[in-house]
Amino acid sequence: MASCSSRIYAPQHSLVLGLASINRSRAGILSKRHLSGCSDLIEVRIGSTDSLQKAHLREKKKNKGPSYRNVQTNGRELQTDDIEKPKIAILLEVEGVIADVGFSGNYHAFNVAFQKLGLNYASWTRPVYMNLLRKAGGDDKRMLFLFFDRIGWPTSYPTNEKESFLKNLLREKRCALEDYVRSSSLSLRPGIEKFMDDAFEEQIPVIILSAYSRNGEETASYIVEKLGSERISKTRIVGQAEVDKSFYGQLILGKGISAGTDELLAKEVAKAVAGEKQRVAEEVASMLNLSVEIDTTPDEMLKKIIASLRAGAEYTDIPLQNCILLSGCQAGVCAAQRIGMPCIVIRSSSTSRAEFPSARAVVEGFGYGELTVSKICRMAK
């Protein structure tokens, strides 16, 4: 396939900082380019020593990469063989990108769960499922609350046992989804395997983000397994454990450090406020007989996605602004926008009518006429 770049550009200024000299194997240090916008000054304690390494992490142009210039030698422009070409990395979400689990998987799993609990009257049609999905922002538990609040809760469960009922229902749904994902009923998205192979051929790092998959890392792992061991061996899978071990996870998120009472209380207040905003918005929309679609991504979820994106960029050792996220959900697009990471949306059955104004591009799938590695390379120039 075509090379990523027929012309080669070199940075006018170096991105190497004092942190570059720190032993990465001991401290897990992340360079300036991965912490753009995180902090003006960070102090890092190295190993068991008492010395502190100070790194000034000010970005002159926030969320923008270094400027590039043509490199000339003896009156000619350097070609591909002269110096190394600019690097990019590709970050892949699992659900919606590697496989379209949205409608077929979740829709099927909910109805199987209803049947197992003897709730045949609760069988969802496609329009019902899509309406609940939109209103609840993809949150399974909220979808069920909205549904049963409308049609009535099962009389076999006392009112004070709603939480227990939902817990059982969600457990059955999760089991049904895992069975569906493991089976041959769920196929990988057409063209995704060739897309990844083309990226490997171009020596483009490929990161698979499983940390914030809607249905959990275990379900995501079953999907990833369908790629085959050879492809998996050439990628880096970033789950929650990898996020926690990353420099961003350890230093910025403070993983391994117990949160104080004030911090925990602040988080609970934020959740309550977000829930109240959602409730008021739905009531107003109902009174005005309007159908509205609002961003229902909780702050905590957004932080989790941002942490995953930053960790993914860190593991590639490529500037964050040169890492391209392929996303299948609104939350991923929003998180990428927050940190200045380019994002391309791969539409799925759940997002066929959604709008993504902040995405670099929106495509229907992979392959000729849609998204290819060569197109990404041209966009990255």
Image (cartoon, helix red, strand yellow):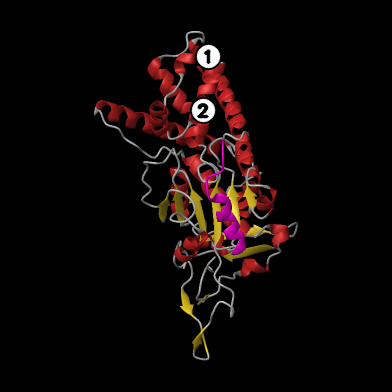
Quadrant containing the N terminus in the rendered view: bottom right
User: Residue lying farthest left?
Assistant: 288
> Which residue is identified by label 2?
108
Q: Please tell me which residue is depicted at 56% across the width and 70% down the height of the picture.
A: 15
Q: Is residue 192 magenta?
A: yes
Q: Please tell me which residue is depicted at 63% across the width and 57% down the height of the picture.
A: 315
Residue 3 coordinates in the image, percent (x, y): 54, 69
Considering only vertical position in the picture, is 298 above or below 51?
above
Q: Please tell me which residue is depicted at 61% across the width and 27% down the height of the picture.
A: 175
For discs 1 and 2, the disc positioned in front in the rendered view: 2
Residue 265 coordinates in the image, percent (x, y): 52, 34
Considering only vertical position in the picture, is 208 above or below 158?
below
> Which residue is identified by label 1?
161
Residue 48 coordinates in the image, percent (x, y): 75, 57
Residue 166 is at least partly visible in this image: no
Q: Label 2 crowding class (10 Å Cα cut-off): few <14, some 14-19, many 20+?
A: some
Q: Which mark is residue 230?
A: none
